[in-house]
Image (cartoon, grey):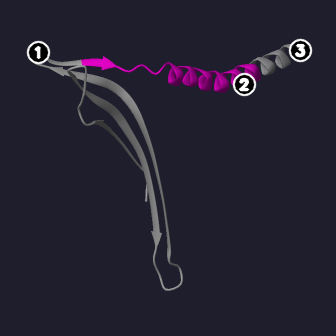
Amino acid sequence: MKPRLTREVVRGAPFKAKGRVFVPEARVTMLIVRKAMLGTHATRASGIQIARIRPTALIEQSADGEHRHRIEDPTGRALFRLAVAAAAVPLILNALAGWLGAQRK
């Protein structure tokens, strides 16, 4: 079976703080892989489920409507940039070494 990736935005239970009502909101990303094999001598089953829950906003509810307070993720952005740099730097150095090697010949 092919892996199934689902993304969903969910809201939590409302709570009150200093007379104001807030509702948390999060993005749930799930990867599900299932396998099964049936037969007289080959009964197998396996499964993997990975979930990532990332808070996205805190929604303030009032008589005027809803006001959305975004939740920033500076650590996630920094880690993403580091991952891109970790992948790009070896490729650039390899290309540079190949170019310098070609120049010496």
Residue 98: assigned label: none
Residue 5: quarter of image = top left
Dot 3 falls on a residue whose secondary structure is helix
Residue 52: quarter of image = top left
* Of pointers 3 and 1, the one earlier in the residue sequence: 1
Q: Residue at x 38, y 30 (%)?
A: 55
Q: Residues within 10 Å of mark 3 (few under 14, many from 20)?
A: few
Q: Nearer the viewer, mark 3 or mark 1?
A: 1
Is residue 96 found left or right of 42 in the rendered image?
right
Q: Name the residue under label 2.
A: 90
User: What's the amino acid at mark 1?
Assistant: Asp
The overriding secondary structure of the stretch rendered in magenta is helix
User: Horizontal and vertical percent for residue 54?
Assistant: 41, 32
Is residue 32 found left or right of 101 in the rendered image?
left
User: What's the amino acid at mark 3?
Assistant: Arg
Residue 104: assigned label: 3
Q: Residue at x 51, y 21 (%)?
A: 77
User: Horizontal and vertical percent for residue 20?
Assistant: 21, 20
Residues at discs 2 and 1 in contact (Cβ within 8 Å): no
**Can you say whether 77 is above or below 12 in the image?**
above
Number of numbered labels in the structure image: 3
